[in-house]
Image (cartoon, rainbow, N blue to C red):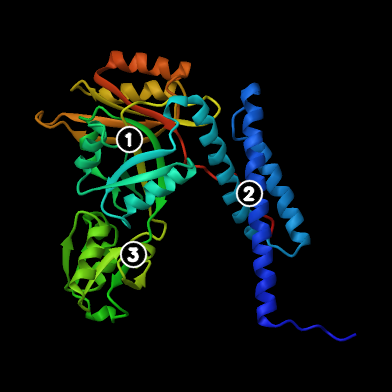
Amino acid sequence: MTEQHYSLDDIRKNVSHIDNEILKLLSERRLLSLEVAKSKIGTAKPVRDQAREQELLLRLIKTGKTQQLDALYVTQIFHTIIEDSVLFQQAYLQKLANPDSLQPVARVSFLGAKGSYSHLASRNYFSRKQTKLVEMSCSTFRDVLNIVETGNADYGVLPIENTSSGSINEVYDLLQHTSLSIVGEITQPIEHCLLTVGDVDVKGINTLYSHPQPHQQCSEYLHSMGDITQEYCSSTAEAMQKVAELNLPNVAAIGNASSGKLYGLTPVKGNIANQQENFTRFIVVARKPVDVTSLIPAKSTLIMSTAQKAGSLVECLMVLRNLNINMTKLESRPVIGNPWEEMFYLDVEENLKSDVMQQALEELTRLTRFIKVLGCYPSENIKPTEVEIEE
């Protein structure tokens, strides 16, 4: 029996056919997950069932082994599929909980032009909501808020913290004075690289353009470059546009490789951030708060000012501990005009409407000089279900 040989074109056609079948099946699976969400409305069951997910993953790992697929490969693929399923169900349930917010088109403000990290985060967030965007670029964080406050945009997207450079203090300071509510969040991977006009030698670069945050997040690599001039721009998009206009071999921008293509730039050095796992968390703000269904995990963000005496902050934090409310973020910022007085920002994993959160707010109100809820919103940080993978 002679062995059949396929041409490269035939092999590629078969691979493309399989890829199309995979996409079809993923679409069918997503629609079934929507039916799961509908069934949970009547039973009031939460979207996530960690025990069910763990059982599913273990079964898939076992089945994968019979197909010569290693456990890590299967786990990575299905973690992504499960995350998509959870977010898809959450988006559906949130639409039911907030019928007034249903709109086919949304006006969204963000920092920088097309290609900035804020722009990418905006697109990724609203793609989950299946909402078309009218994109409104802004030159400052204050403008992002103002355009929403005045009704000229429906939503604003702002970076709030980064795994490498920490909190974005300017945004926290602006949140002290806004009337807007936080209605959503998204965590965006940040993949910094050097972008130039053409494929140039990195050693010849002596001037770098970017927003101050990427400069800070890539400080170790920039130090290794020696004596270079760091020029600050209002966004990574402006930096890329500047480098494209200069059209010089000795200048570069720090930004995202795919965004650089919009400006005709070439990535000449990737993975330049201090941390390889570099993520920025963005918040979404709007004029009206949203209701978060009890079927999905929620976050609430508060700001408060405590009395100027020893132990005041500890007393407030003990309220959360005693009520078993998990705090995921605590940030302090100075109160403008009041020297040595701090405003504290807290993110907690609890729905504002829950009995335990209402009790916490009641106790915190008695202990603080000032307290305000900035928003309650769906938590979209989907932690993968852990399973033990046998070697």
Residue placed furthest toward the front: 104
* Image coordinates for residue 293, horizontal then vertical, percent: 51, 25
> Which sits earlier in the primary sequence, circle 1 or circle 3?
1
Contact flag, marks 2 and 3 (Cβ < 8 Å): no
Q: Where is residue 261 in the image (x, y as percent from the top left)?
A: 35, 67
How packed mark 1 is, by other alpha carbons closer than 10 Å (few <14, some 14-19, many 20 or more), is: many
Question: Would you call the spot at circle 2 few (<14 residues within 10 Å), some (14-19), or many (20 or more)?
Answer: few
Residue position marked by numbered label 1 in the rendering = 154
Is the C terminus in the top left, top right, bottom left or bottom right quadrant?
A: bottom right
Residue under the image location 76 percent in, 84 percent down: 5
Q: Mark 2 points at which residue?
A: 27
Quickly name the residue at label 3.
Answer: 262
Mark pair 2, 3: CA separation: 30 Å
Identity of the amino acid at label 3? Leu
Q: What element carries label 1?
A: loop
The kind of residue tagged 2 is: Ser
Residue sitting at 75 percent across and 54 percent down? Answer: 62
Q: Can residue 172 be seen in this view?
A: no
Q: Name the amino acid type tagged 1.
A: Asp
Residues tagged 1 and 3 counted as in contact (Cβ below 8 A): no
**CA–CA distance between discs 1 and 2?**
30 Å
- Asked if residue 310 is positioned above or below residue 226 in the image, the reply reads above
**Frontmost residue, 18 versus 54:** 18
Q: Which of marks 1 and 2 is nearer the N terminus?
A: 2
Depth order, front residue of 90/227: 90
Q: In which quarter of the image is residue 147?
A: top left
User: Which image quadrant for residue 158?
Assistant: top left
